[in-house]
Image (cartoon, rainbow, N blue to C red):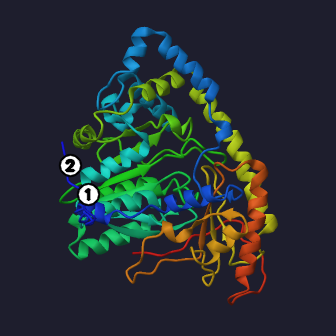
Amino acid sequence: MQYPASSSTPAPPLSLSSKARRTKEQPISFLINAAMANPSLVNLAAGLVDPLTLPVEETRKITETILSDTVRGRAAMQYDTTLGLAELRKHALKHLESLEGQPANAMGLTPADIVITTGSQQALYLVGETLVDPGDIVIAANPSYFVFTGTLSSFGAQVMTVPMDEHGMDVDAVERLLTRLDAEGKLPKVRVIYCTSYYQNPTGLTLALDRRPKLLELAKRFSRTHRILILEDAAYRELRYDGPALPSIKSFDSDNKYTVLASTFSKPFAPGIKTGYTAMPPDLMHEVLQQKGNHDFGSAALSQHVALEAMRSGAYAAQVERLRDSYRKKRDILLAALEKYMPKRDDVTWTHPDGGFYFWITLPEHVNTSRGAMFDKAVEHGVLYVPGEYCFQPDESGFIPTNHIRLSFGQVAPDQIERGIERLAAVVSGQLGRGTGEAPARKAQHGRVARATS
C-alpha cells in the first residue's frame, strides 16, 4: 500500500473551547521549572509537604493489611461509588464530629452528605463547576488562593474581592459589597462566598471566631431569589501549632443549607493518596455527583482504603501529631530568621501564622517583588519565593499590589530555612534603598495585608 507523501503545509490551529481560552497557565508551573533548573536554590515558594515526614513505613503496613485480605484487596482494586467508600465517609464524619466538638446531627449531617474526592482541590472545582456560569460573581478575600481563583476565571466567573486584616477575611466588607451589589441589581449573580478559614494560603491568617457565624448570617440574609453558598476551604485545618481549635463556619449551619466544607487527608497525612472529603447540602450533593460522574465515576478506591485503614489503625492521628511537631519547629525557625535578618522598619512586616505552611511579607509600595524585578534578584541570590501579585485580583481600576511575598516552609529542610531567609533579606535590603521612606524603625511583630478591593 502506498501512502501519500507528507505535506510541508502546516496544520491549521486548534479550535479551543471558550473555557480553554479563559484558562491561564498557573504561576506554580513557572516556579516549579525555576526550582528544577537550579537545585541549589532554597525553595521557599512551593507549598509542598516535607518529604522526610511522609509516612512511608506506615503506609506500607496499611497496604499490606489491605492486600493480604483477598476480599478486601479485590474491593480496593475495584471501582467504588461516585459518592465514595461508605466506611470512609462514616469515619470522615466521625472525625469531623471530633474536630467540631459536636454531633453530626447538630450540623444537619449524615454520611450521605459527605463526598470523597481526589483531594479537596477536586471538590473546589466541582462546586464551582456546578454553581458558576460565565458572568456570575464569586466573592473572595484579597489576597486569596490563586489556584482556585484561576479556576474560577476559567469558568468565566467575576471574582470580586474584599480585604483581609490580621483576623482574616473582612466580613464587614463582605456585607458592604453584598449591599452594593443588591443596590446595583447584581445580587442575583452572586453564587458563592469563598473563604479559607484556617491558616490561609497565601497569608497564613485565620478567620476570627466572631466572624464565622456572621459570614453565615450574611449568606442567609442576602439569599433572596436564590441561595448564596459559603465554600469553606479547610485544607490546613489540622496543621495547628498555636492558638485555639476554632469551629468551622459549617458548624454554625445547623440545617446544612448554606455551607460547603472542603477538607482533605492529603496535607495532614500524605498528598500521595490524593483523597479529600467534603460536607455539603443534599441538593447540592446531587448536582455535584452528576458532575463528578462525568469526571471519574468516583475517586480511586485503593487510596480511599488507605485513608480508611489509616484512620482505623490510629496511623492517621499519629501522623497528624508528627507533622504538627515537625512543622511547628520549622515555623519557629523561619520566624526567628525573619526577626534576625529582615530590615527593622515599620514598612517591612510579616504575618505570624498559628498553623499551615505560609508567611506573608509586606514591603514598601515602591519595592516590586514581581518577575523581572526583585524576584530575579532573589533567584540570583539562591532563594525562591512566590510574588504576592499572583494572589491578588485586580481592583476596579485594574490595580494589583506588587510589594508582597508569599513564603512556604513546607518542603524546606530545617537547616536550609535560615540560609534562605538570610539571602532573601539581603535582596530586600538592596531593594529598599531604591525608593523613599528609608528611615529605620521598629519591626512589626504581626504582618498586615494589603487592603486592595474590587
Residue in the picture at 40% in, 69% down: 161
Give me the C-alpha separation between circle 1 and circle 2.
9 Å
Binning the other alpha carbons within 10 Å of mark 2 as few (below 14), some (14 to 19) or many (20 upward) gives few
The x and y percentages for residue 188 are 21, 64
Residue 23 lies, in percent from the top left, at 34, 62
Label of residue 6 in the image: 1
Marks 1,2: beta carbons within 8 A: no
Query: Which one is nearer the viewer's eye here, 168 or 423?
Result: 423
Say which residue label 2 marks: 3
Q: How many marks?
A: 2
Give x and y (percent) for residue 309: 50, 21
The residue nearer to you, when weighing 118 against 214, is 118
Q: Quadrant of residue 289?
A: top left
Q: Which residue appears farthest toward the bottom when viewing the image?
A: 436
The secondary structure type at the circle numbered 2 is: loop
Q: Is residue 244 left or right of residue 3?
A: right
Residue 252 appears in the picture as rendered? no
Kindly indicate the quadrant of the structure image that contains residue 300.
top left
* Foreground pick, 361 / 384: 384
The residue positioned 28% from the left and 33% from the top of the image is: 297
